[in-house]
Amino acid sequence: MNLLEAYHQIYTYDTGNNLTSLSHQANSGDWQQTLTIHSNNNRGTETQQSTN
């Protein structure tokens, strides 16, 4: 049984270089996490994760 597999990740940033999304793609399953940046500072305040 092989527990390792190849995967691909894509990172997206806004104009202030804050991470806004992370997409993970693999044969075993894909998922994406979206981060909401607070409007008064550069802190991520909410995240949403979805699977495909």
Image: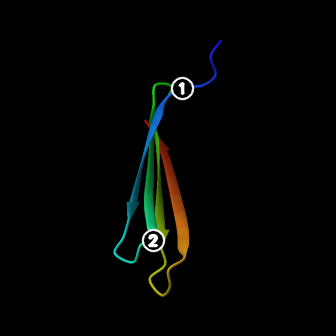
Element at badge 2? loop
Say which quadrant the C terminus sits in.
Answer: top left
Picture layout, residue 48 above or below residue 39: above
Residue 29 horizontal/vertical position (percent): 48, 30
Q: Which residue is mark 1?
A: 5
18 lies above or below 5: below
Mark 1: amino acid:
Glu
The earlier-in-sequence mark between 1 and 2 is: 1
Circle 1 sits in a helix, a strand or a loop, which is it? loop
Look at discs 1 and 2 and give the one toward the viewer.
1
Which label belongs to residue 36? none
Disc 2 marks which amino acid? Asn
Residue 46, by quadrant, is bottom right
Question: Which residue is located at x 43 percent, y 57 percent?
Answer: 21
Looking at the image, residue 6 sits to the left or right of residue 14; the answer is right
Q: Residue at x 65, y 12 (%)?
A: 1
Instruction: Look at 45% across and 71% down and name the residue there.
Output: 18
Q: Please, which colouring scheme is shown?
A: rainbow
Residues under numbered marks 1 and 2 in contact, where contact means CB atoms less than 8 Å apart = no
As drawn, is 32 to the left or to the right of 14? right
Q: How many residues crowd around disc 1 within 10 Å: few (fewer than 14), some, or many (20 or more)?
A: few
Q: Residue furthest left?
A: 15
Give the numbered dot on residue 18. 2
Count of marks placed on residues: 2
Distance Cα–Cα, label 1 vs label 2: 29 Å
Residue 30, given in percent of the width and then of the height, sits at: 46, 35
Q: Crowding near pointer 2: few (<14 within 10 Å), some, many (20+)?
A: some
